Amino acid sequence: MSFRRVMLVKELIRKLGYVNINSLKKWLNLSSTNDARKLIYKLTRIDKDIEPVYTVTFEKEGPLASFSVEEVEESRLHEVMRQKMKNGWKLKSKYLTGAKLRGFTLMII
């Protein structure tokens, strides 16, 4: 992964506020989503103004299984996980889905 690509991703995030893994893969013509994830991990180590965003899936067991999917920035991740687990939800999966500028509000529709 070249430093030039990392800086390009940094500029994209600064201009857009948020980018996801699949968009990065397309825009930068990367061979896999893992390459995009690596780029984001490198960038978040370099620039503290950019934070990773995770998709977290929870499951609540019972006669009817319930699932909850949330997209959470890293700064709120442990708080959200603790609150959900306190309410009886069990963590099913957690994976990196993108990166955002700190202070940028995610609007998920």
Image (cartoon, rainbow, N blue to C red):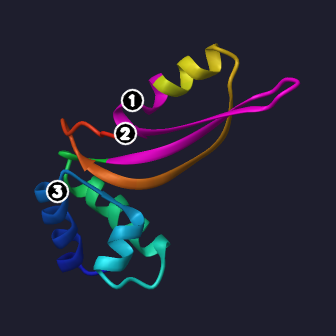
Q: Earlier in the sequence, mark 3 or mark 2?
A: 3
Residue 35 vs residue 55, the one in the foreground: 55
Q: Earlier in the sequence, mark 1 or mark 3?
A: 3
- Using residue 101 as the reference point, say whether residue 63 is left or right of it: right
Whole-percent x, y for residue 8 in the image: 17, 72
Residue type beneath disc 3: Leu
Answer few, some or many: residues within 10 Å of disc 1's Cα (few below 14, many 20 plus, some between 14 and 19). few
Marks 2 and 1, Cα distance to the nearest angstrom?
6 Å
Residue to which mark 3 is pinned: 16
| Segment tinted magenta in the rendering | 52-79
Q: Where is 95 relative to 12, above or below?
A: above
Q: What SS does tag 2 mark?
A: strand
Q: Is residue 61 magenta?
A: yes
- Using residue 37 as the reference point, say whether residue 43 is left or right of it: left
Residue to which mark 2 is pinned: 73
Q: What residue sits 47% from the left and 72% below the top?
A: 33
Whole-percent x, y for residue 75 in the image: 35, 33
Answer few, some or many: residues within 10 Å of disc 3's Cα (few below 14, many 20 plus, some between 14 and 19). few
Quarter of the picture holding the C terminus: top left
Mark 2 near mark 1, Cβ–Cβ under 8 Å?
yes
Q: What SS does tag 1 mark?
A: helix
Whole-percent x, y for residue 15 in the image: 11, 58
Residue 9 has which mark?
none
Q: Where is 37 relative to 72, above or below?
A: below
Residue to which mark 1 is pinned: 76
Residue type beneath disc 1: Arg
3 vs 2, front mark:
3
Q: Where is 23 relative to 101, above or below?
A: below
Q: What residue sits 68% from the left and 24% below the top?
A: 89
1 vs 3, front mark:
3
